[in-house]
Amino acid sequence: MGARPQFIKAAAISHTIRDLYSGQIQEDILHTGQHYDDAMSARFFRELDIPAPRYNLGVGSGSHGAQTAAMLRGVEEVLLSEHYDAVLVYGDTNSTLAGALAAAKVNVPVMHVEAGLRSYNRAMPEELNRVLTDHASTLLFAPTEAAKENLCREGFAHDKVFLSGDVMLDNVRRYASSAMLPDCYEGEQILLTLHRNLNTDEDKRLKAILSSVDMAAGRLGANVMFAVHPRVAKAVESMMFDNIKPVPPLSYHETLAVLQKVRLVMTDSGGLQKESFFSGRPCVVLRTETEWTEIVDCGAAILAGGEEWSIVAAAERMWSVKPVPPSQFGDGRAAEQIVASILHHYHNESML
């Protein structure tokens, strides 16, 4: 793993191994270094009590090709020097793909947590990562029925696909009650995040989206907390808006605490879409598609894209929505089901 969303997902699995299966599974963590800023990396290991990585490749930033290539080489070197029974990967980042491909190339089974998601937008790097990772995997853990159906339609063997539920729901239920909000973040009514390349790589588009969010907030009489990703912090510095307050990236506990206070979430993040839903907050998705179609289908989120009229209309429409409690994402024990399935798989393999 190597990016903020993966650290959050990994926490649920790591705690389950430590609490229930420490005598049966040895977990070693390889950190690619894709996210390396303390606020996006080490802070999450401390806050979520994740075991320290045994390996850290320190890859850092770079183009998709260069970054993934450096990760591939580093992961392969580790796998060739050690004997592992499996490589477990999370989500859809470059680290996910690198781990899956490196393992598959040296015949180490790959297990993919959060398999089967599809946005059907191949222009998104994450879509390519998740599809290729699925096709390199031995066991696939689908968080929802829709994700499982996607895999079955693509021809994956039914005995390799497991409907596990979502590990992020595990974490929300574990941590939400203890999440604390710093006093300086009180009073904001909309939480905003942006990090997708499509929305942030060009200053013109980034400014247009922020202007639209600012306009929507003004019409709603709301204040916006904009948790700024380090990659776009420099661009945002020169942009000033009446209703938007830029703040540093939020920790996981801060995110959960903010979600208990705000009325609306606006984001292009897949993970935050789910956390909003799990926290009972409506979401405006600043994309034209989502891999989490279940949230849109039940009316808890709306696709707004990046156009001014669409963003403003979506914010006004979702302002008073009260999402229903989640049921499509499992019972909050996904990590237990995943680890138990892994052990069952290896028990059956040893009997052959």
Image: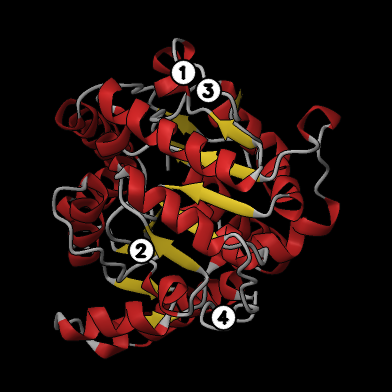
Mark 2 vs 1: CB contact within 8 A: no
Q: Amino acid at mark 4?
A: Gly
Disc 1 residue type (three-letter): Ala
Determine which of the numbered discs, if any, sits on residue 241 in the image.
3
**x and y percent of residue 300 in the render?**
52, 70
CB contact under 8 Å: marks 2 and 4: no
- Residue located beneath label 4 in the image: 330
Instruction: Name the residue tied to disc 1.
Output: 233
Q: Nearer the viewer, mark 2 or mark 3?
A: 3
Against 71, is 131 above or below? Answer: below
Crowding at mark 2 (Cα within 10 Å: few <14, some 14-19, many 20+): many
Please tell me which residue is depicted at 76% across the width and 32% down the height of the picture. 185
Q: CA distance from mark 3 to mark 1?
A: 15 Å
* Mark before the other along the chain sequence, 2 or 4: 2
Kindly state the secondary structure of the residue where label 1 is placed: helix
Residue that numbered label 2 is attached to: 112
